[in-house]
Image (spheres, rainbow, N blue to C red):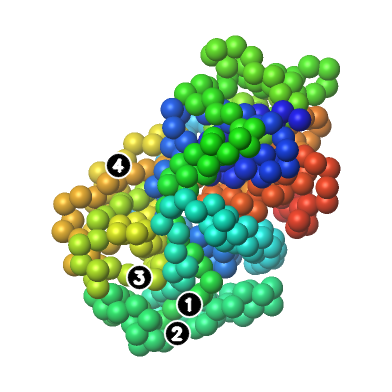
Amino acid sequence: MHVLILGAGVTGLATARALAEEGHAVTVLDAEPRVGQGASFANGGQLSYSYVAPFAGPGVIGKVPHWMLDPDGPLRFRPQADPGQWAWLIAFLRACNPATAELTTRRLLLLSYLSRDLMRELAAREGFDFAFAPAGKLVLQPDEAAMAGARRQMELQAKWGTEQRALSREECLALEPALGHIAHRIAGGIHTVSEDAGDCRMFCEGLAASLARSNAGVTFRLGLRATQIIRAEGRVRGVMTSQGVIEADAVVLALGVGARALARPLGLDLPVYPLKGYSLTLPIQRDDAAPRISVTDSAAKLVYARIGRRLRVAGMADVVGYSTAFEEKRLTSLVRQARAAFPEATDWRELNPWAGLRPATPTGLPILGRAPGMEGLYLNLGQGSLGFTLAMGSAAVLAAEIAGRAPPIPLDGFRMGSMP
């Protein structure tokens, strides 16, 4: 079967590998001239298999007013004349309840554990460098109330196989001495030893190079934009591009936030909207002053990951439309907070700022599987800030779906139309 994958980010490339291993001829199409240029380019770098609780949690609504008024706040909203934005926000607010958050977490853990096993197998087998490291992760809590909530979440996830431990402030500092400059802001933390870190863009480039030279039957059509999904006689037949039609037996939409526009003419209203995130990539100049373990500041919603000799700082979630422009206020805020945490890790002259659009669903569950009522069209999108984490598992689900096999995990909640 010839499968056309729209999107050469980490989700699309992982899907290409999974399908090629099953003997399909695969074409990967992307408007960018290189792979990994969208949300995969400079994300947080954390492979966060155990920390997947959705942004739409039961305590979020009460925090939104404070976040909106705080110039360093992790969330910002700018109203758009876009019905999709308002529909997404309404669905997001409806998902901010304990029952939905618990169900979403349980389902995401199943997918992330599958992804973890496949990622580690790939890292051991393929041999290309993407700064992969079994770093572990420490999620910092700012006060006793937050720590109590984190312990409850830890106990909940323990029922589903997550191994974590709660640490005091002193234990956090013993585990990661580089946190000394913000010790006064730490009440405790949750440590997960089984988390990894890596460079998502390097992963995309290494995986694409491996597929291109391995005679795997994967063709890359980069710098070419899909303008229309072609349907005839009740099924999808391929896509129209600026250079003509590319025919295929099946099409996989793995375009992130770009998928909505292509799906809409087919009558599919994908519940995906961009959450704009920001990052810095800093050269580490004092090894002992930069964290060795991946760190998440839960109050600021910032993540820190060591990627080789670089420190990746990432965070924030702006619901502001589709622009990828890096705004000066957000850059200033990110630098200020990172510099307070690890002031001597670098000289702060080389920042490498980046902004990208995370393709998020209201619940946080990605959309996987066959498009409803659309023979030959498959969906693999909506992973949000967990794109790198969930890529390998999502690809395995798609490969099983296209082959007509039972999926490796239950797809309740992941199929379009079945979300809570």
Closer to the observer: label 3 or label 1? 3
Density class for disc 2 (Cα within 10 Å; few <14, some 14-19, many ≥20) is: many
From the image, tell me which residue sits under label 2.
Answer: 167
Cα distance, mark 2 to mark 3?
17 Å
Q: Which mark is residue 191?
A: 1
Residue that protrudes farthest toward the top in the picture: 244
From the image, tell me which residue sits under label 3.
Answer: 292
Cα distance, mark 3 to mark 1?
13 Å
The reply to whether residue 75 is visible in this rendering is: no
Q: Earlier in the sequence, mark 2 or mark 4?
A: 2
| Residues at circles 2 and 4 in contact by the CB criterion of under 8 Å | no
| Residues at circles 2 and 1 in contact by the CB criterion of under 8 Å | yes
Place of residue 50 in the rendered image (x, y in percent of width and height, measured from the top left): 57, 68
The type of residue carrying mark 4 is Glu
Density class for disc 4 (Cα within 10 Å; few <14, some 14-19, many ≥20) is: few
Quadrant the N terminus occupies: top right
Q: Earlier in the sequence, mark 4 or mark 1?
A: 1
The type of residue carrying mark 3 is Arg
Q: Earlier in the sequence, mark 2 or mark 1?
A: 2
Classify mark 1: helix, strand or loop.
strand
Cα distance, mark 2 to mark 4?
36 Å
